[in-house]
Structure formats: C-alpha cells, structure tokens
Image (cartoon, coloured by chain):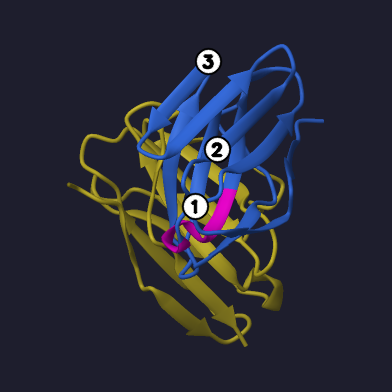
Amino acid sequence: EPEVTQTPSHQVTQMGQEVILRCVPISNHLYFYWYRQILGQKVEFLVSFYNNEISEKSEIFDDQFSVERPDGSNFTLKIRSTKLEDSAMYFCAGGPEYNEQFFGPGTRLTVL
Amino acid sequence: KNEVEQSPQNLTAQEGEFITINCSYSVGISALHWLQQHPGGGIVSLFMLSSGKKKHGRLIATINIQEKHSSLHITASHPRDSAVYICAAYYRGSEKLVFGKGTKLTVNP
C-alpha cells in the first residue's frame, strides 16, 4: 500500500540556518499539508496547498516559511532562518480530497 | 473560536477493558477525524466521521452533531493499543484540521 514518506527523519541544524524538509505524497493526492508538533504540545496546522498554490495558512506560517511542489512529486517545506522555537516534529499529509488525510512519519527538527 | 477538547488527558486500563475517549468541539464542523499517534511519533488516521457511527475491528467511533460530541471506543483493549489518540476537526470554510491535545492511553497486561 502506498505511503507518504518524509526525509530526513531527523535534522539537526544551527540557529539561523536554512532547512528544507521533504515529503513525497501518494501519487493521486491533490491536497497537501504541513503540520508541526512541538514536544509535549498538540499538533498545529501550518499550511495547505492545492492546485500548485497555498490555499490556507496559519499565523505560524510567516515569511520565514515557504512551500513548494517543484516537480509534481516532492512537496517541500523551507524554513529560511531557523529559530530555537522551530524545534518540533514536522508532519506532511496529503489526500485525494480536502477532508481525507494520510500522514507521513514526520521529520524531527532540532535547532541548536 | 474553533476548538477541540478531549478527555481524559491520560487513561490507564487493564488488558481486556472497554475504553472510551471523549471529544467535544465548537459549532460548525464539517467532519471529524480520530487519529492514533505512536510513541515514535507517527500519526495514523483511524476514522473520518461526519455523522453516525463507524467500526473497524475493535475500534468504534461515534459522533452526535447536535451534542457537538464524539467518542472513540476500544473493545477488549490490548497493550498494543497503547498510544496517544487524537481528535481533530474540520470547520466549515477551512481546510485545516484543528487538533485536540490528545489522550494518552496505556493498557497494562
């Protein structure tokens, strides 16, 4: 059964560095999402992406964040200049419809 | 404000017990998800509900739209059911899932 995959599984970076988190959604998915979960807290929505553009974003998703689907398969989240408070688990999700989502295994980002 | 509340926050049970986890939400949802998060962090969707009841194996999810309440039941619980169970809702006019804080379930043998 096809699965959403994410790479890397764990990324350690220095504060101020750029990071790119990668996701490969299931091929027939049309809606794509990024979420984050700070340790011990609930999962929070970051951004949704449909038809090659952002369809909704949260207050967290400021100018430091961007998303791309450069080649029709990968879906990336870029954080331009990481802060300590960006340390979290980042989940990618996708679905054939907006209310059906399949989650990736997550990337743990640690900012030092 | 669109919110999702879960109870209890933590739940410990003996193997074989019937488990109920509750979720309440604000008016205006279009659908509700029950998700399972394992200790490693991965999230799996268990059910998506907009009305009534769904069953999969030992798991049953119900939703009462008028009461703004949903429950997840586990029959004949097993230690492998130990995980965090999360309720998350879609509110009309939005594509984002609003998550509850989760219920940490521990089933002891």
User: Can residue B92 be seen here?
Assistant: no
Disc 3 secondary structure class: strand
Label 3 – label 1 distance at C-alpha: 25 Å
Residue in view at x 47 percent, y 29 percent: B48
CA gap, disc 3 to disc 2?
Answer: 14 Å
Q: Is residue A7 magenta?
A: no
Residue A41 in percent (x, y) is at 70, 61
Q: Nearer the viewer, residue B41 or A27?
A: B41
* Amino acid type, mark 1: Gly
Per the rendering, the mark at residue A99 is none
Separation (CA) of disc 2 from disc 1 = 13 Å
Q: Amino acid at mark 2?
A: His
**Which residue is at a point 74% across and 45% down the rendered structure image?**
B7
The chain to which mark 1 is attached is B
Q: Which chain is blue?
A: B
Q: Which chain identifier belongs to the yellow chain?
A: A
Q: Pointer 2: residues within 10 angstroms few (<14), some, or many (20+)?
A: some
Task: Report x, y in % for residue A25.
Answer: 29, 48
SS assignment at label 2: strand
Q: Nearer the viewer, mark 2 or mark 1?
A: 1
Q: Chain of mark 2?
A: B
**Residue drawn at the location 46% of the way across and 56% of the way down:** B81
In terms of sequence position, does the residue under pointer 3 or pointer 1 come before the other? 1
Disc 1 target residue: B16
Q: Farthest left residue?
A: A1
